[in-house]
Structures are given as C-alpha cells and as structure tokens.
Amino acid sequence: MSILVLGTVALDTVKTPFGRRVKMLGGSAVHFSMSARLFTEVHLVAIIGADFPQKHIGFLHKKGIVLTSLIKEKGETFKWEGEYTGDLNAALTLNTELGVLTAFSPSVASEQRDINLIFLANVDPDIQMQLLKTMRRPHFVGLDSMNFWINHKRQALIKLLKEVDIYVANDQEAKTLSGENNLIKAAKILHRMGPKMVLIKKGEHGVFFYSSRFIFSLPAYPTDKVIDPTGAGDTFAGAFMGHLAKSGKINEKNIKNALLFGTVAASFNIEGFGADRTAVLKLRDLQKRMRQFKKCILY
Amino acid sequence: MSILVLGTVALDTVKTPFGRRVKMLGGSAVHFSMSARLFTEVHLVAIIGADFPQKHIGFLHKKGIVLTSLIKEKGETFKWEGEYTGDLNAALTLNTELGVLTAFSPSVASEQRDINLIFLANVDPDIQMQLLKTMRRPHFVGLDSMNFWINHKRQALIKLLKEVDIYVANDQEAKTLSGENNLIKAAKILHRMGPKMVLIKKGEHGVFFYSSRFIFSLPAYPTDKVIDPTGAGDTFAGAFMGHLAKSGKINEKNIKNALLFGTVAASFNIEGFGADRTAVLKLRDLQKRMRQFKKCILY
C-alpha cells in the first residue's frame, strides 16, 4: 500500500550544542517521508515558495518521494528557527515565518485520491480536514498536530479527531489537549474524543500506545548520540505508518512492530542535523538496530 | 538469602491533590522493607526517637521485619514534610527535621553481620560507609542516595560508590552526580565511578539499567491511579533486591525479572498514601500485576 502524507516542507535553521545549521531542508512531511520511504511509496502533499532550492526537489525525487502534489507558489517557503539546550528534549522556537503556508490549499492529483493510508502531519487543522475530504476511500488515517493549533484552532482539531484512526501527540500536546497531567488519563480522554488509537511520544522516554483493544508501552532506543532532535516525531510516524502500509493489515502484532520501527527510526534522526542521517538510511540499518533494541528491552 | 537494609524510619507529612496525611510511618528503610519482605527476611537498621509511636513498631514486627537493630534514642524521630502538585512526579520538600538522625551511629547485632545482601537506602553517606564496614562478607551491596548528599557530601558518596555493586539513582540525582544531562551518558559516567551496575529510576517513565555486560530499558507500569508517590523508589529497590535474594543468583535473567518486580511493586506504592497500599500487599498481587504488565510491554 502507498501512503499519502500532508504536511510542511520547510527551511529550518537549528542551533544545538553541536552547531548551527541555516535553512536546511525540513518540515513535517519531509521528515515523515524520509523514514516512510524505506517501507513503501510515499506521496507528498505540501507547498513551497519561489525561494525553495531546486536541489532539495532533486533530492526528494531521488529518494523516491512522489512529488505530484507538491505545489510551488509565489512567495517565501515556510521557515522555522529553533534552538535546543540542556537535555535537548524540547526546542525553543526563535522564529516562524509561515510564508506561502498561509494560503495553502492542498490539491491532490486524481489518481492519488484512492490512496487509503493517509497521514496528516503537522499543519493547520483546517487544511488537514480539507485534504481528508478530497480522499475517496481513506482506510487508515493518522493525525499529528502541535500546541499552536491546540491553543488556536482547538475546535477544528476536535472535529478532526473524530475522523481519524490514530492521533499522534507528544506528551506536552497530549497534556494540553486533554487538560490532564497523567499521561495514561490523558490518553483515555483523547481516545474518547474520537480516534480509535492514541499514540503519545515522550522523546527520550519512549512512547505510550492506547486503544480499546490493547495498550503498549515502549522505552526509547538508549542512545547518547543526540545532535538534533528536530523531526524525530515525524520520523517516528513515518516508520510507524510505513511498516503498517508494508504489512498490509492493521492488527496488534503489526502495530507493535510498527512502534518498534518508529522508535528505531527516530533514534537515527536525532543523530544528525535535519534529515542528514535519515536521508542515507537503508531498511537494513533499521533492521540491524531493531535487533540491538530488542536486546535492551527483552526480558 | 536475607537482606539487611540501612536507612531512615520517619514520620512523613504529605500533601497531594488527593489529601493530606500527618506523621505517617515512612522513611527509606520502611518503604524498602514493605516490598522486600514479600520475597525474603528483612533486617532493618535505623534509628527512631522517643516520640515514635509504639503502634508502628508493632506494625513492622507484624509484617515480619527483624527489628533487632532498630535503635531508639532520646529525641525526635526524623520528620519529612512534602507536597506534590501537577503530574506528581517530583516532591517539593516543605520541611525536614533530622532529630535523632544527626547522632545516628548504626550498630548491627553480631549474628546480622554475616548477611551478604545489603541495601544502603538513603541516609548520610558516612553512616552508609560505617554500616558497610561492620559487615563481614558483603556479597551484593546496593546504594541509594539523594541530591542533598550529592551536593553536601559528594566526596563521601564518591568513595562509597567504589564499594558497592549497584548504585540506584533517580534521573535528577544521576544528572547531578554525573554532571551530564543525557541519561545514557550519565549512567556510563556513574558506572566508571565504581559500581558494577547503575540503575536510573525515571518515575512515570520507567527505569534504565546499565552494566558492562548488558543494558536494559523498561517503561513504568501504565497507571492513572497516583495518590502519593512517596517511597516509590525505595519500594522499587526493595522488590528488586528481594527478588535477587530469593532467586539466589545475580545474573542477567534474575536482574531483568527483579527490575520487572521493582516496577510493579512501585506501581502499588503510589496507589495509596505512605505505605498504606504496600503494607497489605501479598506476593500474589505482585505476580498478578506482573502478568498484566508483561502484556503492555511484550511485542
């Protein structure tokens, strides 16, 4: 099965204790694609501005990402600038320039509308809903968001939650949207808001998965190599959805393995700036680290 | 094998969003004993003041704790007052009255000096060292501490680290003592300071175990019932050491199972104020929850 991902394609400027990078290729849809492509064909739906470097388009194309619905408009590409300090667990946003994103109306090529695995990566929930409505037979829909939308477009997000199969949130987002500090309670509340499954990402502390059929808790891959965590959550989601697409069936076994793949993919993402590390990743790298990971969590 | 635990016996006043309890039975050695007793005979080494209620002594005795080396001195029992808010992950200490603890010199009955499983629960590192030196044939020694000693008796603690088999710390303590924010790096640094094994407790995020032979990462038992987390770490350590004592051999399999038992025991501790919940716990309760826990982490 192919995957269609809606999200941002951005130029990221990131500072961490290990250096500073200016206007790297980034964005939720890019990070998602970098890991999802290892499992299946990925169709990217996003907008870029006239200033977007052609070399990045060449790069995405070379990585096998289908760019039919990547639209280019007059104006500036979405830009984000952030800094990580201390334990690198949370970014401090220094600047956000929405650019062409403010006028983004996703259009999906007719032949792409039959894709039934869809991931709505972080972008305005109104745009996420608009995309979802153009799809003909969504079978499994994942949704990510961020605190900005939780605070500023809460109602649109709540409406969207009723339409998706899995809601993916980091711990802070889960707490904010549910109004509950205990993450298990938060997951239950979010589950009652509509999605069949809730996945809470806790950074270095792993993930917690909740559904009415089973729950699953997984630590992160133990690593002391953290260069830049930007995009780790999207990389996780990409491998998670990718494995589900590849295995073809959404069941407990495949979901648990997808969570393991997501964990391992995220551990590669943080080892380099932007998508440096995931861009050169092969499926066999994931599989090799998966075996190491299993040793650390098997009893 | 029996276990000897050195630590505090305290009267705790705790406020959480679920209420306030005044001068409950608490202290590191008490919480440790409440879970360790489920596995083996526990010998408690601690000091109490003249104000210590006789009913608590009767209670500990009834729970099978060997109180030969619990000494009573003129003066006040050690008292701690704390408050938990928000996600209940960290206590705010409101007041500490050391009382008789300031003059504590542990004395161990001759027949207890042959016990070879020893846990040095949180207390002044000089006292921990003094106790350790009176033991005839320590085979496996666990050490806990807290930020106060890390900051105020760093050298004594560093000296002690070279004498123990496992150092047990929470994430904040591990970061402070190692000077490193990444917990995997912190564990490696602490390991180089002497102990054969390092166990980092991360509260609701589980535990991370590090040794030169293997590493192990485990999420917490997923629970939304958190009444009072006081003593969760000591309860963890008690079940961990207890299982090792019962299984008789310190190997990878037994250590991993001990970490699972510790996790499950801690999840009971937080369900009630003080030792309310662990005081009535049976081994079969632990075993039952262990089965539920395994379902949440097995893939």
Image (spheres, coloured by chain):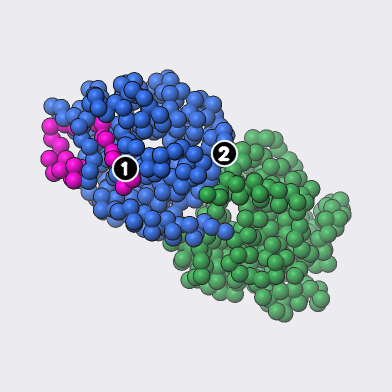
Chain colours: A blue, B green
Amino acid beneath label 2? Phe
Q: Is residue B223 left or right of residue A177?
A: right
Q: How far apart are labels 1 and 2 at the CA level?
A: 26 Å
* Residue A253 rendering spot, x and y as whole percentages: 50, 44
Q: Nearer the viewer, residue A279 or A95?
A: A279
* Residue A128 sits above or below residue B187 on the image: above
Mark carried by residue A116: none
**Is residue B292 in sight in this rendering?**
yes
The furthest residue to the bottom? B136
Label placed on residue A214: 2
- Among the 4 quarters of the image, the one containing residue B2: bottom right
Could you tell me residue B168's position as x and y percent? Answer: 59, 61
Image: A200 above or below B144:
above
1 and 2 marks on the same chain: yes
- Residue drawn at the location 36% of the way across and 54% of the way down: A286
Q: Is residue A236 above or below residue A70?
A: below
Q: Quadrant of residue B242?
A: bottom right
Name the residue: 27% across, 48% down: A275
Closest to the observer, A94 or B246: B246
Q: Is residue B157 visible?
A: no
Q: Is residue A53 magenta?
A: yes
Is residue A114 within the magenta segment?
no
Q: Quarter holding the N terminus of chain B? A: bottom right
According to the picture, the residue beneath numbered tag 1 turns out to be A40
SS of the residue at dot 2?
loop
Q: Position of residue A97 (x, y in %)?
A: 23, 32
Amino acid type shown at disc 1: Thr
Q: Nearer the viewer, residue A281 or A53?
A: A281
Chain under numbered label 2: A
How many residues crowd mark 2 within 10 Å: few (<14), some (14–19), many (20+)?
few
